[in-house]
Image (cartoon, rainbow, N blue to C red):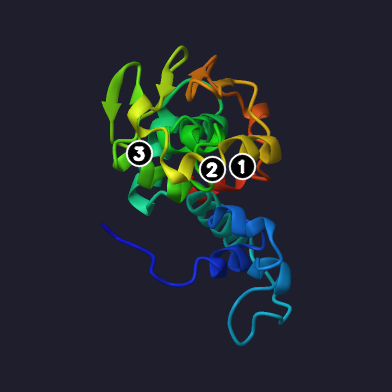
Amino acid sequence: MAKYNDSKCRLCRREGVKLMIKGDRCHTEKCAFDRRPYAPGQHGRARKKVSDYALQLREKQKVRRIYGVLERQFHTYFTKADSAKGITGHNLLISLERRLDNVVYRLGFASSRQQARQLVRHGLFTLNGRKVNIPSILVRSGDVLEVPEKKRKTEALAHAPQAIARRGLPGWLEIDGPAFRGTVKALPQRDDIQTPINEDLIVELYSK
């Protein structure tokens, strides 16, 4: 599988927005985007004329990097969103939001989506009572995500209450902190996704 091995903070600077890739570090004075809020490279501070295509491409790359999916995966999500009923852009974002690793992150069990993927791959969670290790599973309304009792002392879960207090819990999710259990109350809607994303630019890019 393709893997990005360069500095992850460069991605935030490239997209011009905090992608929260490094979790808690993004909230500290060590955040590279706060210290250098311009594109990386020798000409990062230079003013450039941006074409419509460049805007569309940057928006697509930003969303890919926020949710941590590869190009082929992202294109698959778009194809399915385009063939489904409803607004293509909304369908796309809702599908990404339903990913299991994103739900783990939204519930506060991980400081970043990257850490959430790692925890899921290590089999730390059960979904509806069954062990899962596939981060790309799409949750459904009524699904219950839980950490088995013998794995609740994992160090990565220690800061879950603080993470929820800082980020807030989406209305479509519910959490029982003492029981280490999260419930999908309903499928997310476009209004539930507060991340600054212009999905219309992505649709325009793939419609060329």
Type of amino acid under label 1 = Asp
Q: Which mark is residue 63?
A: none
Query: In the rendered image of this protein, does residue 16 appear above or below residue 87?
Result: below
Identify the residue at the far top of this view. Answer: 142
- The kind of secondary structure element at disc 1 is helix
Number of the front mark, 3 or 1 = 3
Mark pair 3, 1: CA separation: 31 Å
Type of amino acid under label 2 = Val
Q: Position of residue 206 (x, y in %)?
A: 47, 47
Residue 77 quadrant: top left
* Residue located 38% across and 53% down the image: 71
Badge 1 vs badge 2, beta-carbon distance below 8 Å = yes
Mark pair 1, 2: CA separation: 5 Å
Type of amino acid under label 3 = Val
Which residue is tagged 2? Answer: 203
* Residue located 57% across and 31% down the image: 90
Which residue is tagged 1? Answer: 200
Q: Position of residue 100 (x, y in %)?
A: 41, 32
Q: Residues within 10 Å of mark 1 (few under 14, many from 20)?
A: some
Image position of 12 (left or right of 208): right
Mark pair 3, 2: CA separation: 30 Å
Query: In the rendered image of this protein, does residue 165 appear above or below residue 84?
Result: below
Q: Position of residue 63 (x, y in %)?
A: 54, 49
Which residue is tagged 3? Answer: 120
- The kind of secondary structure element at disc 3 is helix
Image position of 100 (left or right of 87): left
Q: Nearer the viewer, residue 56 or 119?
A: 119
Could you tell which of marks 3 and 2 lies nearer the N-terminus? 3
Q: Position of residue 172 (x, y in %)?
A: 59, 20
- The kind of secondary structure element at disc 2 is helix
* Residue located 74% across and 78% down the image: 47
